Amino acid sequence: MRVRQIFFFLYLYINTCCFPVFAQQSSEFQAKYIRGTLLPHHESIAFVVSDYQNGVEFQYNQRANHISIYDSLYRFPKFGIGYQFVSLGNTQKLGYASNLFGSMQISLFSNQKSNLGFEQNLGLSYIYSPLEISPYNTALSSRINFYAGIDIYYEYHISQTHTIKSGIELSHISNGKIKTPNLGLNSIGVSMAYIYTTTLITKPQKIKHIPRQQHALYSLISGAYKSDDFLGTKKYHVASALLEYKYVPNRRYGILAGINSFYDQTIFSIQTNNTTLNQKLHILEYGIHSGIAAHYNNMYIFICSGMYIKASNNKPPYYSKVGIRYSYHNLLFNFSVKSHKTTADFLECGIGVYLYKSKQQ
C-alpha cells in the first residue's frame, strides 16, 4: 500500500449501559467538488499524467443512535456512505474511477459556527480503463480495486441546516497485488462542499460500556493469493502466521509487538531451478514488527513496521502492514495488507484466537 493511513470504523456495538449523556443526533446530505493531482511514484505513471483530477462526491452521514463510551472519546463522530466519480489525471490513458465507500468523521476542534475535523474513508473502486482497455495504465490492471481516503476539513455553519465545507484530501487505489501490474494510484486534492442538515434532536442517551483489556496476547493465521511480478495470469497461494502482544494504555490507542512467519509461493516463479524449494519449509520467511492501534468499540485499525529475520534474496529488508481487526469473544478477525516500501506484497485475510487477556477494566 502507498497510503499508510487507512482508518475506517462503520460499526455500532450494543452492550451494557451505565450512565446517561446528552447527544445531538442529526442526518446530513453533502455534495462536494474535488480538484487534485496524482502523485506519481513511478516513472511509468509520471509519463502519462497530463492533467489535474476533477471529481464530484455525494455523501449521506448520520450520528450514532446508540452511544458507546468510544463515541464520547471521539467527540461523537459521524458515520456515512459516499459515492465519488473522479478523473485520474489523463482521461484518454488512465480514464475515470467510481468509488463507493463508508466514512467516519471525527471532530478535532469546534464551536457554534465552525468545526475542524478528520475524515476516514474505505471502500471499493471501479476503474473504467484498466490495463486490458488502455495499455498505458500500468498502475492498475483490474477493474475492481480497494479505495482508501483521508481528509482534513473545515466547516463553517451558516445556519443550523446549511454548512460550507472545505478540505485537503489524500486517496489511494490498489488491488493488493491480486493482479499485476499493481503500482496503484495516489492523489492529493482540495475540495469544496455544501452540506444540508436535517432535523436536529437533542435527547438523553445511555453510554454503552465496552470492557477494555490492558494486556492481550493472541495468534493469527491468514491466507490469500497473489500474482507475480511478471504479468502472468497464474495465481499463487500466500499465507502468514502471527504471534502478537498488545498493550492498551487507554481506550483509544494501543501498542503492538510481535513475530511473523510468511509463506509466499511466488518465489517458485523466480527460482524454478532450485530443487530445495520443493521442500516448502525452506521458503518460509520470518520477521519481527511493532506498531500502533486505534480502537473503536470491538474494532481497531493498526499500522505496523517490521524487519525480516529470514527472507528470500529478492525481498527488501523491511516490510509494513496496515489493516483492521474485529474481536468477538475469544476470536479475532483480520483484514490487512503487507507491503514493501510503496508497493503492496499481498493481502492477509484470517482469523485468530486470544491466548491471554488481562482483567477487564
Image: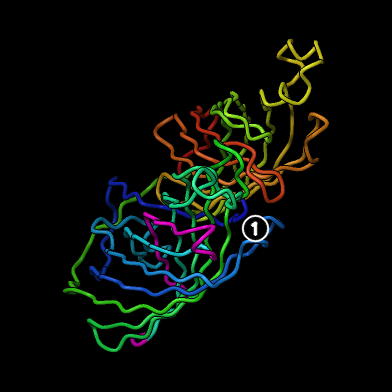
Residue 334: horizontal and vertical position, in percent? 49, 36
Magenta stretch mostly in which secondary structure? strand
The quarter of the picture where residue 22 lies is: bottom left
For image coordinates 54% across by 54% down, the residue present is: 253
Q: Amino acid at mark 1?
A: Ile
The quarter of the picture where residue 318 lies is: top right
Task: Classify mark 1: residues with Cα within 10 Å, few (<14), some (14-19) or many (20+).
Answer: many
For the residue pair 220 and 342, the one nearer the viewer reads as: 342
For the residue pair 185 and 300, the one nearer the viewer reads as: 185
Question: Can you say whether 50 is above or below 233 in the image?
Answer: below
For image coordinates 68% across by 51% down, the residue present is: 342
Give the magenta range.
89-113
Residue 251: horizontal and vertical position, in percent? 49, 53
For image coordinates 47% across by 69% down, the residue present is: 118
Q: Is residue 30 left or right of residue 217?
A: left
For image coordinates 63% across by 43% down, the residue present is: 344
For the residue pair 204 and 49, the one nearer the viewer reads as: 49
Question: Can you say whether 108 is above or below 86 in the image?
Answer: below
Say if residue 263 shows up in the picture: no
